[in-house]
Image (cartoon, grey):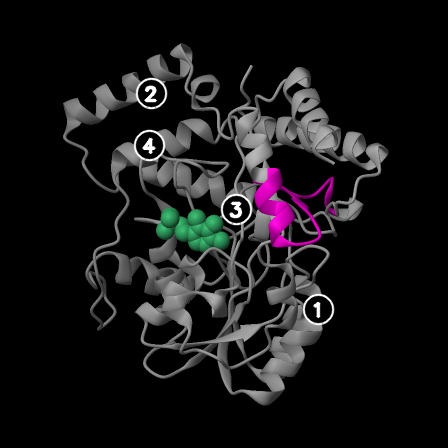
Amino acid sequence: MSVPFYNFNDLHTPEFKAELFERFSKIYDTNGFVEGEYNASFESRFAQMQEAKHCLLVANGTDALEIALEAYGVGQGDKVGVPGITFYATAEAVLNRGAIPVWIDIETESGLICPESTQRVIEQHKLKAIMPVHIYGMAADMEKINSICEQHNVAIIEDAAQAQGAFFENGKPIGSTHNLTTFSFYPTKNLSAFGDAGAILTQSDELALKIKTIRNHGRSELDMLGRNSRCDHMQAAVLDLKLERIEEYNKMRKTAAKHYHTTLKAAELPITLLNDRHLETSSWHLYPIRVANSEIREKLQAHLQKHEIGCTPFYDQAMHQMKVLKNFKEGETKKAEELAGRSICLPMNPFLKEEDIQKVTSTIKAFF
Ligand SMILES: *Cc1c(COP(=O)(O)O)cnc(C)c1O
């Protein structure tokens, strides 16, 4: 019995297909190609769910980050704080704007951006913006980070590509702050399109208008040019339909995460688990465990793969260790370097069965 990392068969059921094809048929019949009624419906419902005033759909998650930077006026030569551990799109968006990434260190227990490092890096470098990442689906400590950035007049873009439906510790949803918050709806994310899509959330009417203008070639009363980052009507129809299930599916992920957590904790293995305080609030996009070093990680990965268990080493390099980013050395990277290569993400999706989790955890126990 194999345990796959993702599970699209149980996500895309025959019932889902029937409902979706009805929508596609309507789009076909009305020639509703881009920015149609499902775009409007999704934007209003997703904004409501995440407690933002506006949701603006765009073409993908990386565009969402780039457009957010542009909306804040970040461009050529500006410095932007990026956590040392993230998916490379976060840094890529900064480079695509002609801006310079400055590394902010992470907390080893979670991989989330470290508020103390944020403070030091902001004091030492003239940053125009920072991009905290709600990594694996856990919320970064925005209360502390907001107050540091407010004092120094630094804009914040929250990269929530992995955190649809996640919550802050105070119970508020991600997207409810006064920052720009960006999402990716790539097929492997918790809330996913049938291809590419992304979104930006904001409480500001002014920024919402700017983002709308940028995503559609500058078409508005604003005197500016933009680009093409519209979201197809078909992708919006998928997202709008899937939105009905996201809360239920995130709860199913949480049940799986808790099951992994209690079983692995009880086994007393030489591994580190995420802190208990994230159990209730994370969107559980990924379930990482950490081992002592990268050799053990590689061996454990091979062992799991031999037993047909899907797993991925997110993230095996810190940003500044990537060959293509080696010219960017400013900031703090010590803990990111310590953490990189030691994490392995176990199968995580809403449809994991009890016996799947039993198999994964007993295979890990057998390895040690
Ligand atoms: C997936 C992801 C992105 C990029 O999303 P795309 O839709 O692939 O452009 C950005 N940041 C993080 C943290 C991600 O996980």
In depth, the one of 355 and 306 nearer the eye is 306
In contact (CB < 8 Å): disc 1 and disc 2: no
Locate the N terminus by quadrant: top right
Is residue 292 at all visible to an observer of this figure?
A: yes
- Mark 4 lies on a secondary structure that is loop
In contact (CB < 8 Å): disc 1 and disc 4: no
In depth, the one of 51 and 237 nearer the eye is 237
The amino acid type of the residue labelled 1 equals Lys
Identify the disc placed on residue 162.
3
Q: Is residue 140 above or below residue 72?
A: above
Q: Residues within 10 Å of mark 3 (few under 14, many from 20)?
A: many
The amino acid type of the residue labelled 4 equals Phe
In contact (CB < 8 Å): disc 2 and disc 3: no
Residue that appears at 56% across and 82% down: 153
- Mark 3 lies on a secondary structure that is loop
First in residue order: circle 4 vs circle 3: 3
Q: Is residue 71 left or right of residue 299?
A: left
Q: Nearer the viewer, mark 1 or mark 4?
A: 4
| Disc 2: which residue | 20
Marks counted in the figure total: 4
Between the residue at mark 1 and the residue at mark 2, the CA separation in whole angstroms equals 42 Å
| Disc 4: which residue | 194
Between the residue at mark 4 and the residue at mark 2, the CA separation in whole angstroms equals 11 Å
